[in-house]
Image (spheres, coloured by chain):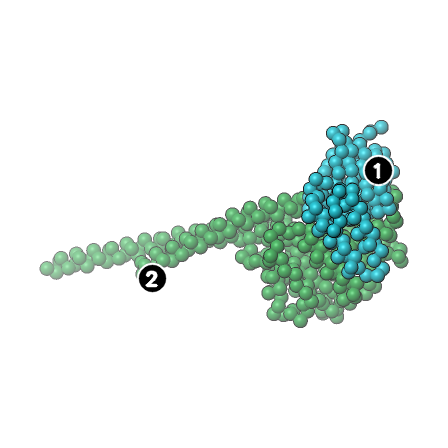
Chain colours: A green, B cyan
Amino acid sequence: MPSLKDLKNRIASVKSTRKITKAMQMVAAAKLRRAQDAAEQARPYTDRFNAVMAGLAASVGGSDSAPRLLSGTGSDKVHLLVVMTAERGLCGGFNSSIVKLARARAAELIAAGKTVKILTVGKKGREQLRRDWASHFVAHVDHSAVRKLGYTNAQDIARDLLGRFDAGEFDVATIFFSRFQSVIAQTPTAQQIIPAKFEEAETGAATLYDYEPSEEAILADLLPRGVATQIFAALLENAASEQGARMSAMDNATRNAGDMIDRLTIEFNRSRQAVITNELIEIISGAEAL
Amino acid sequence: MADTLQFDLVSPERKLASVEAREVQIPGADGDMTAMADHAPMITTLRPGVLRVTHGGGSDDYVVSGGFAEVTAGGVSVLAEQALPRAEVTQAIYDEMLAAARAAQSSAASDAADAAAKTVADMVTVGEQLGLAAR
């Protein structure tokens, strides 16, 4: 049975924990709003870009002259998995669920006899993957010093990827990130970015465009930009998801701390009562003995 | 016949403009072009340059680089990798853009060298148009 002083100390410590988690929750909520704004701002660009690319890809894709970024290298031996996670923890299952998806995919590919390479973005994913997959790591992108994600961050990653692709280091690249659905729901997602895949645009009312310089030239110019665009969209989704996950995790923690304080307070009151009763009994029985 | 067209200018990070415009002058990869209402639908890539939108209340200039413009009968959407209102392009920002273009040129592979050199030349021209020094 813990003493009264012990209980008092525990209550005080849980109370200060609750203060911290509460503060983290509020910070996450503010950051989430900003991250969502950024994602919203980027959406028109991404949507329009993908729509145009889908149209272009559909008309050029079949021909032999299609760029390698679209048609692929002709083999799918070497897979590069780009695992995007957060730089910080304390955000519930956010990092683990992305890593889990990537791990499952890597195991699957290895079982199918492919070579797997892993590029990590964000410290937490790297830490989790290090134990089993360290030998597959090829590079790491650190965003811990980045305060506000910009398009240039995505461009840097894209440039790195394209350089590796041109050097023949891999055939297929897939990005792993978490799609933001709501504060309580984020879906880990795998998306193939090289060779580029575009969802078929709803045709029918397709406009016939004139292309300047030419369809092929435009495609060759835009495909590398498309990689950056998709990475940027994924980074933004990820940032929003991270803050959403952190917010709900911290909300839970705050509520748990509250419950714990209630429980401890009841225990504290009971033991105090027991001590008082004990003292009374001693005094009364002492008086009776006289 | 409608005499205005919907003009949208978006960059990956934000939407810069969405106005009813009378004409839009686009720095296309193969030369400047002006789109007015009921233009034939076309898609062109952009070179670094100054994009001018003329609308009821005057005209706005934007410095754009990289990306493409989609012209349809009813509107023009410009998706630029980098886009800034002219007023926001200071000497410091311009220096940065030019430095980036030069860096890309020096690291470009031989088959892309011409394109990279053209980008740098285009950037220098932009500087002349804006009255900023190319350093």
Q: Would residue A139 appear left or right of A266 to someone viewing this image? A: right
Residue A224 figure quarter: bottom right
Q: Where is residue A117 in the image (x, y as percent from the top left)?
A: 71, 67
Q: Which mark is residue B102?
A: none
Q: Position of residue A41 (x, y in %)?
A: 67, 44
Crowd class of label 1 (few under 14; some 14 to 19; many from 20; radius 10 Å): some
What residue sits 75% from the left and 69% below the top? Answer: A114
Vertical relation: B5 (above or below) A226: above
Residue A280 figure quarter: bottom left
Q: Which mark is residue B34?
A: 1
> Which amino acid lies under the numbered mark 2 shown in the image of this protein?
Pro
Foreground pick, A177 / B64: B64
SS for tag 1?
strand
Residue at numbered disc 2: A2
What residue sits 82% from the left and 29% below the top? Answer: B3
Vertical relation: A208 (above or below) A78: above
